[in-house]
Image: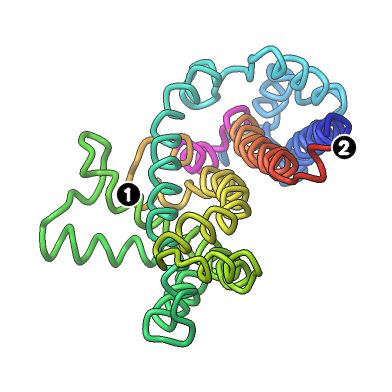
Amino acid sequence: MLQFILKRLGLAILVAFTVSFISFSLLFLSGDPAAALAGETASGEDIEAIRTLYGFDRPMLVQYGDWLFAALRGDFGESYYFKLPVAGLIAERLSVTMTLGVCGIAFALITAVPLGVAAAMRPNSLVDRIALFMSVAGQALPSFWFGLILIVVFAIKLRWLPPSGTATWQHFIMPTIVLGYYAMPAIMRLTRAGMLEVLSSDYIRTARAKGSSELRVMFRHALRNAIIPVVSLAAVQMGFMLGGSIVVESIFALHGAGFLAWESISRNDLPTVQALILIFSMFYIVFTFLADVLNAWLDPRMRSS
């Protein structure tokens, strides 16, 4: 068990360093950052002055090394646009993104798990077909289009919910639905498949033969075992959702880390973009690592090794 955790931890650290280097390289390979900062009307002297001021004239590996060592200390530099420390700027916005991510995964679990259980209890029934339809629609439906539809219906037509902002908890309802709906199909399908497999097991037939009620069999025996891989999947989906909140926050004007990423990209704010790419990647890496550890801990064979 300890050897498995150490191996996964080493792999996670290697992936984190690889992602940081690739993201740093792509931002510089996409164009001359000094020219982008100077603007279209800048002269060659102005561009060279900016290149020298920000150290863009140094080799890229040297720039990456300086940036990485500073980032490990929590120093991501100063924002070119906001003129503020990047670390403080992201910390101020991150609470909105974390709130949205937690609410989104909670909505996905509360909705998808009961639907998956109901579909497994009655295969090929109307409930099963509804769950299958929602699963397919969730994969095919673009989040930006779904968000715009919710705004038109519930904010503009019915006026039940505010269309944007973070002032009250009502502002998070539509973004939570849009973000959570992204994770629902995978959780629903895995719950249904796990329940169907568990329900065909010998110990389920034994529990029924002993006279246990159907609800007790479903929730005490079947769901208890089928939910294990769902918890691991939810941890991975949480990382995906936090990284994918850029679109949702942009649609609903939630001033979180995702909206900050959109602002920074549109304004060529390289230090902020680099830091956000690293942080969003770390979300996914950390939650994937936790899912692997949880799977290993829940597996009796791994715990005994």
Q: Is residue 274 left or right of residue 128?
A: right
Q: Point out the residue furthest to the front here.
A: 210
Measured as percent of width and height from the top left, residue 193 is found at 59, 70
Left or right of 179: which side holds 289?
right
Determine which quarter of the picture holds residue 160. Answer: bottom left
For the record, the magenta segment spans 260-272
| Residue picked out by circle 1 | 252
Q: Nearer the viewer, residue 197 or 260?
A: 197
Q: Camera-side residue: 105 or 34?
A: 105
Q: Residue at x 87, y 37 (%)?
A: 305
Q: Which mark is residue 305?
A: 2
Image location (x, y in percent) of residue 64:
80, 26
* Residue type indicated by callout 2: Ser
**Mark 1: amino acid:** Phe
Task: Using the image, determine if residue 230 lies above or below residue 13.
Answer: below
Residue 154 image offset from top left, x and y in percent: 18, 61
Q: Is residue 231 magenta?
A: no
Residue at 53%, 57% (x, y): give it.
Answer: 221
- Label 2 SS: loop
**Of helix, strand and loop, which one carries label 1?**
loop
